[in-house]
Image (spheres, helix red, strand yellow):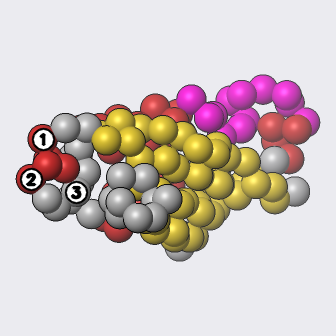
Amino acid sequence: MIGTAGVRQLQVDCIVGIYPHERAAEQPVLLDIEIDYDFAAAAASDAIADAADYDVLVSSVTQLIRTRQYQLIETMAEEAAALLLDRLPQVRTVRLEIRKPAAVPTAQHSFVRLERTRA
């Protein structure tokens, strides 16, 4: 019973970017994270121990992004996806989109999107 769970519009304030002004102050990035895994055990037990825990997902990604201080959101996305596959062993696939609202003054945001599947 493979299903998809996740979070939308997770805001993380962090240092990100290549320009000096981006390295001087935190700015928000917005993440949409989807994870695919087998819901059967969680649905049968109704226990968080059998599910992919949102708290682990959110806290792991937030801590990574805040401490790593990336230059590129591409690197941020790759490392966040790898971290989730490592920390949530039941997850088969991670889909992730990261938006950087302050990147391009004449655009709503810049973004990267990726999908990674457990080997």
Residue sitting at x 52%, y 70%: 114
Residue found farthest to the right: 44
Please give the label number shown on residue 24.
1
Residue found farthest to the left: 20
Answer yes or no: do the residues labelled 1 and 2 have beta carbons within 8 Å?
yes
Task: Report which residue position mark 2 lands on.
Answer: 20
Please give the label number shown on residue 108.
none
Label 1 to label 3: alpha-carbon separation? 10 Å
Callout 3: helix, strand or loop?
loop
Task: Report which residue position mark 3 lands on.
Answer: 17
Label 2 to label 3: alpha-carbon separation? 8 Å
10 Å neighbourhood of mark 1: few (<14), some, or many (≥20)? few
Asked if residue 63 is among those painted magenta in the image, a careful observer would answer no
Callout 1: helix, strand or loop?
helix
Which part of the image, by quadrant, shows the N terminus?
bottom right
Residue 19 at x, y = what percent? Answer: 13, 59
Which callout, 2 or 3, points to the residue nearer the camera? 2
Residue 20 at x, y = what percent? Answer: 9, 53
